Amino acid sequence: MQRTWQEHHKVLVILAHPDDPEFFCGGTIAKWILEGHSVAYCLLTCGDKGWNDPTVNPKELCDIRLKEQKSAAAELGVDHIRFLNYPDGYLIPDINLRKDITRIIREEKPDIIVTSDPKLLYVGDNRINHPDHRAAGQVVLDAVFPAAGNPMYFPELISDEGLKPHSPKEVWVSLALEPNLTFDVSDYWKIKMKALLEHKSQIGDPISFQERMRRRHTKNSTLEDPHYEEKFRRIVFD
């Protein structure tokens, strides 16, 4: 695929959990970085409930997942990650979280924001989408418009913190229910997989995990000659 943008862009990926960027759009992130764009992450939780063993200490799990996320991001070429450390599983797209994300947008001043789809309730026929994914997408979109670019919203961010309004040029909604853009990320799949394998606490047996991921090839390709895609709803502001 041809380059998406001719000039250098700054991309900010705002998602709910460690491992979301790599699972949702790791191939696209790898593509962008290799093309010379800069990519940063803002993750709203540290994933402290991403385990089914009640004997695991949530604080220890949080520390593990933060380390895993840094290692995974490094495989893609991302070295700037911010964690807001909201409790995993309890995200609500309320005014406090909206303000926090508005602050991040005004601080980072991204050209492009990537988030998740608040409308995606079901994943295939056998899974329910995590409520944090939906909440993250909703609150990010609410922060992008109208809050981040309008001085009338959270004026204390200007008066107290010197953060002037900023609006991105585009928003990319990953795992979109109604995508309008599809990337062939076959050339970047190995990089994506190297990053995902760093999330050791989440993937289980790495051999079985890689086999499951290999089967995610497009319907018009095969295991012998697989092709992989990542889909988005791309919103370009005039």
Image (spheres, grey):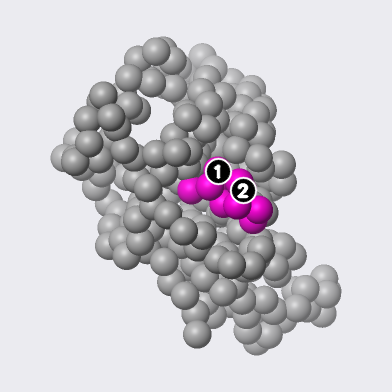
Up the image or down, 16 lies above or below 55; here it is below
Q: Is the residue under label 2 in contact with that under label 1 (CB below 8 Å)?
A: yes
Q: Gap between marks 1 and 2, in whole Å?
A: 5 Å
Up the image or down, 194 lies above or below 140; here it is above
The image quadrant of residue 181 is bottom left
Percent coordinates x, y for residue 53 in the rendering:
45, 17
Which residue is pictured at 25% across the width and 40% down the height? 218
Find out whether residue 34 is within the magenta segment. Answer: yes
Q: Residues within 10 Å of mark 2 (few under 14, many from 20)?
A: some
Q: Is the magenta stretch mostly helix, strand or loop?
A: helix
Find out whether residue 148 is within the magenta segment. Answer: no
Which residue is pictured at 47% across the width and 42% down the height? 27
Q: Quarter of the image for the N terminus: give it.
A: bottom left
The count of marks equals 2
Q: Mark 2 points at which residue?
A: 33
Mark 1 element type: helix
Percent coordinates x, y for residue 95 in the rendering:
56, 68
Mark 2 element type: helix
Residue type at tag 2: Ile
Q: Magenta segment range?
A: 28-37
Label placed on residue 235: none
Up the image or down, 56 lies above or below 21; here it is above
Q: Mark 1 points at which residue?
A: 30
Residue type at tag 1: Ala
Q: Tell me, yes or no, if residue 212 can be seen here.
A: yes
In depth, the one of 104 and 160 nearer the eye is: 104
